[in-house]
């Protein structure tokens, strides 16, 4: 099967790629047969209130309920499929994404827009070539924001069986930090373009200055909770060191 030439896709998941690599190393250190694949979602919003969702999908996520039992999927698996088999593969991926991800505008869940797929090199995030060893699928969705939508959030279903890395951007400007979500979690709200002119506020939402502090606090709390053991060790070590110094001072 000969693949039609595809335009070069810019590597836009640099920060997410590093996070994914870290997650894979952490998961492999726990004795898993194969590292856990993760989903990377890029949510791109524009001033005209159009949006695009790009999802980097590891095929293992929809090929098995236990993706860690499978090795990385070779690119030949995709190349050797007939047109009907490719349609079946895309259908499986679409069904998986529909169960794994929830798009929420102002807290209201919305069905995923129609999806188009492009095979990608799993190592470089560029279109596959004859030298590509591992294949991923780039799922792209485009839509127009609901007229009353003030913010966007992404929910992760229990069926995801993996973590999700979310990158929000507005007119090419990305959020300072990607968000890492786990099954059952929902991302913090991302303010949509033009929402201020709508004169709509989210019930109970803090003022802008308070919102900034809340976001920082939330991120810090999440990071502390997920790195609790390390922080505990550091705190205990610091306390012991301080105690040692105080004892020497008292003895003098």
Image (cartoon, rainbow, N blue to C red):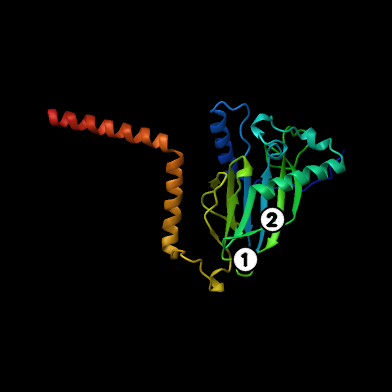
Instruction: Give the numbered dot on residue 47.
Output: 1
Q: Label 1's element?
A: loop
Q: What's the CA distance linking mark 1 and mark 2?
A: 21 Å
Q: Locate residue 164, reporting x and y percent.
A: 59, 45
Vertical order, 214 against 197 (above or below):
above
In the rendered image, residue 211, in percent from the top left (x then y), is placed at 45, 60
Q: Is residue 149 left or right of residue 238?
A: right
Image height check: is 74 above or below 112? above
Q: Which residue is mark 2?
A: 112
Could you tell me if residue 130 is visible in this image?
no
Badge 2 element: loop
How many neighbours does mark 2 have within 10 angstroms: few (below 14), some (14-19), or many (20 or more)? some
Residue 54 at what x, y percent from top left? 67, 51
Image quarter for residue 16? top right
Residue 141 sits above or below residue 24 on the image: below
Instruction: Give left or right: position of 72 versus 90.
Output: left
In the image, what residue occupies the spot 58% across and 69% down? 194
Give the quarter of the image for residue 105. Answer: bottom right
Contact between labelled residues 2 and 1, with CB atoms less than 8 Å apart: no
**Mark on residue 182?**
none
Say left or right for 10 vs 228.
right
């Amino acid at each position: 099967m000969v693949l039609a030439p595809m335009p070069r896709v810019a590597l836009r998941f640099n920060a997410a790629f590093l996070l994914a690599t870290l997650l894979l190393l952490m998961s492999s250190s726990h004795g898993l047969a194969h590292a856990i694949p993760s989903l990377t979602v890029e949510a791109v919003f524009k001033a005209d209130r159009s949006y695009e969702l790009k999802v980097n999908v590891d095929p293992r996520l929809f090929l098995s309920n236990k993706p860690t039992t499978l090795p990385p999927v070779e690119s030949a698996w995709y190349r050797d499929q007939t047109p009907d088999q490719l349609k079946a593969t895309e259908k499986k991926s679409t069904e998986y994404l529909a169960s794994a991800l929830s798009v929420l505008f102002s807290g209201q869940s919305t069905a995923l827009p129609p999806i188009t797929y492009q095979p990608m090199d799993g190592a470089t995030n560029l279109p596959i070539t004859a030298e590509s060893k591992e294949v991923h699928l780039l799922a792209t969705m485009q839509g127009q924001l609901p007229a009353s939508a003030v913010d966007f959030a992404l929910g992760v279903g229990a069926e995801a069986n993996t973590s999700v890395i979310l990158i929000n951007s507005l007119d090419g400007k990305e959020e300072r930090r990607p968000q890492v979500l786990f099954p059952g979690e929902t991302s913090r709200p991302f303010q949509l373009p033009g929402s201020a002119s709508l004169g709509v506020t989210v019930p109970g939402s803090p003022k802008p200055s308070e919102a900034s502090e809340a976001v920082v606090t939330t991120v810090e709390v999440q990071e502390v909770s997920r790195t609790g053991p390390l922080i505990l060790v550091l705190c205990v070590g610091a306390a012991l060191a301080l105690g040692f110094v105080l004892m020497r001072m008292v003895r003098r």
